[in-house]
Image: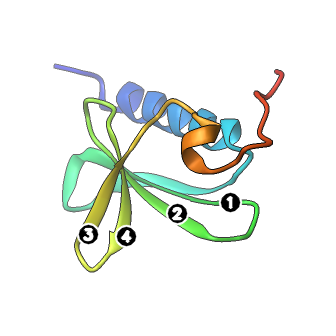
């Protein structure tokens, strides 16, 4: 049996790094009320456009588009794919 607190903490930190790598603003993170094995993350980009993500137990990210539509979203940051040609890796 897995530790639910540890799973939540790991998923939250992973989502924070996902947001930080893109230069976005973290807005929220919680368990999915319809499925406690999944998480919901909320963030905003530099233009204040909000993004909502469903994060599965296996670590896959799905961007929620509304009206029961979604798209799979790569966790690994690829600026060319996301349309940001001038993006550079963040130094930590």
- What element does badge 1 sit on? loop
- The answer to whether the residues at label 3 and label 4 have Cβ atoms under 8 Å apart is yes
Mark 3–mark 1 Cα distance, whole angstroms, equals 20 Å
- The answer to whether the residues at label 3 and label 1 have Cβ atoms under 8 Å apart is no
Mark 3–mark 4 Cα distance, whole angstroms, equals 5 Å
Q: Position of residue 21 (x, y in %)?
A: 68, 35
Mark 3–mark 2 Cα distance, whole angstroms, equals 13 Å
- Sequence-first disc among 4 and 2: 2
Question: In this image, 61 relative to 22: left or right?
Answer: left
- The answer to whether the residues at label 2 and label 1 have Cβ atoms under 8 Å apart is yes
Quarter of the view holding residue 17: top right
**Residue picked out by circle 2:** 51
- What element does badge 2 sit on? strand
- Quick one: label 3, few (<14), some, or many (20+) residues within 10 Å? few
Quarter of the view holding residue 32: bottom left
- Sequence-first disc among 2 and 1: 1
Residue 89 drawn above or below residue 54: above
Q: Position of residue 19 (x, y in %)?
A: 62, 44
- Sequence-first disc among 1 and 4: 1
**Residue picked out by circle 1:** 45
Question: In this image, 37 relative to 4: left or right?
Answer: left
Mark 4–mark 2 Cα distance, whole angstroms, equals 8 Å
**Residue picked out by circle 3:** 69
Looking at the image, can residue 16 be seen? no
**Residue picked out by circle 4:** 65
Residue 10 drawn above or below residue 20: above
């Amino acid at each position: 049996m897995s530790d639910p607190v540890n799973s939540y903490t790991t998923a939250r930190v992973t989502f924070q790094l996902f947001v930080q790598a893109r230069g976005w603003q973290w807005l929220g993170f919680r368990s999915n009320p319809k499925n406690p094995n999944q998480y919901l993350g909320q963030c905003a980009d530099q233009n204040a456009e909000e993004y909502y993500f469903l994060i599965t137990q296996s670590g896959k990210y799905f961007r929620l588009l509304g009206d029961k539509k979604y798209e799979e979203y790569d966790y690994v940051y690829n600026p060319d794919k996301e349309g940001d040609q001038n993006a550079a890796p963040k130094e930590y």
